[in-house]
Image (spheres, grey):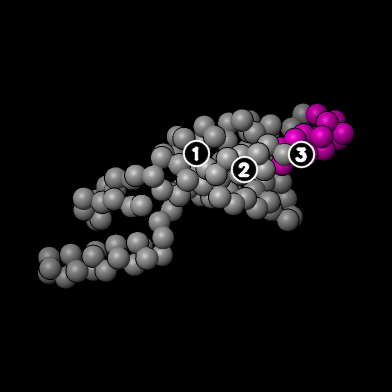
């Protein structure tokens, strides 16, 4: 859930969902067979992580190496730490962003609008 003392200033986060996007930034220096074996290992690892309830959902990119995942973490650092166990981790360009529900986003937008109007 999103906790904010003042939604227009820095937001304090409590356990929230994070979106992680990982793109293969370079071809790992390995043979084709090693690469394909590692792809299998990567997805087996991802599915194990999904099974522990921290990771809610994972999708791979259909046209290139990489994936997105949504999970329940206490911080960006925890989300990144979770991903550090992936076999391709050192070859991934990773972006991690906190998410809020559409309902929380609407409530925050309405509050920000009212705050803006009050300052006029």
- Pointer 3: residues within 10 angstroms few (<14), some, or many (20+)? some
Task: Name the residue at the right extreme.
Answer: 33
Q: Is residue 2 magenta?
A: no
- Bounds of the magenta segment: 30-43
**Local crowd at mark 2 within 10 Å, few (<14), some, or many (≥20)?**
few
Left of 84 or right of it: where is 32? Answer: right
Instruction: Give me the disc on residue 79.
Output: 1
Locate residue 34, reporting x and y percent. Answer: 83, 31
- How many circles with numbers are drawn on the protein? 3
Magenta: main secondary structure equals helix
* Residue at mark 3 to residue at mark 1: CA–CA distance: 21 Å
Picture coordinates of residue 90 (x, y %)?
63, 30
Counting residues from the start of the chain, the first of labels 1 and 2 encountered is: 2
Please name the residue that numbered disc 3 is placed on: 39
> Which of 51 and 93 lies nearest the eye of the viewer?
51
At mark 3, the secondary structure is helix
Give the number of the mark in front: 2 or 3: 2
Q: Give residue 51's mark.
A: 2
């Amino acid at each position: 859930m999103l906790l904010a003392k003042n939604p227009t200033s820095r937001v304090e986060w409590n356990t929230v969902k994070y979106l992680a996007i990982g793109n293969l930034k370079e071809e790992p220096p390995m043979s084709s067979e090693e690469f394909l074996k590692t792809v299998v290992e990567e997805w087996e690892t991802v599915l194990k992580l999904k099974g522990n309830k921290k990771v809610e959902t994972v999708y791979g990119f259909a046209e290139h190496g990489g994936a997105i995942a949504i999970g329940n973490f206490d911080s960006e650092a925890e989300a990144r730490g979770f991903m550090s166990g992936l076999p391709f981790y050192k070859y991934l360009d990773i972006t991690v962003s906190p998410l809020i529900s559409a309902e929380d986003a609407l409530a925050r937008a309405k509050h920000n609008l009212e705050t803006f109007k009050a300052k006029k």
